Amino acid sequence: MKSLLNAEDHEKIVKAIAEAEAKSSGQIRVHLHHRAVDDPIEAGTKVFEKLGMAATAEKNGVLIFVAPRSKNFAILGDSGIHEKCGEDFWSEAAAAMGGHFGKGEFAGGIVATVHKIGDALAAHFPRREGSGVNELPDEVDEG
């Protein structure tokens, strides 16, 4: 578990989140789950709720949930962003991240996915003048 992401990887991911969120009112979180899970969507949904992601003002929170022990992950968008992007967007994002993971590029895959999600958030939920509220922490959550 400790070798999946090092301190430098964490910094790259946090920087990517901050850059993505600077362009939109959306909120992105990354969660590394330390236990094996059978269903990453079910487990990710619980973490989504626990992290308060369903409480964003515009329902535009996105969680990248990674469960290394079970070698699976999920990308979960709240109702506002899901409605704007549709199922194909999430499938494409997951396929691209899975491609990176398959090559052992865990940090690179997460960073690329954060940028892709950030672009979608900027297109559908652009940052408005004077709205600089960061509703959720940018750090990588682990548990």
Image (cartoon, rainbow, N blue to C red):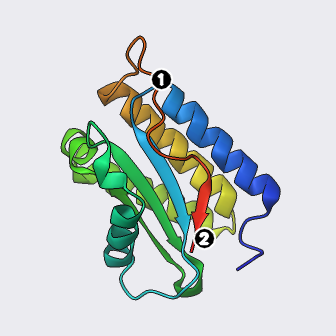
Few, some or many residues within 10 Å of mark 1 (<14, 14–19, 20+):
few
In screen coordinates, is 32 left or right of 117? right
Helix, strand or loop under label 2: helix
Q: Residue at x 37, y 56 (%)?
A: 52
Q: Which percent across, then down, holds residue 89?
A: 32, 48
Q: Is residue 95 left or right of residue 83?
A: right
What amino acid is found at the position of numbered circle 2 in the picture?
Answer: Gly
Quarter of the image for residue 41 reads bottom left
Is 88 placed above or below 23 here?
below
Closer to the camera, 30 or 115?
30
Mark 1 vs mark 2: in front: 1
Q: Quadrant of the C terminus?
A: bottom right
Q: Residues within 10 Å of mark 2 (few under 14, many from 20)?
A: few
Q: Which mark is residue 102?
A: 2
Quarter containing the N terminus: bottom right
Residue picked out by circle 1: 132
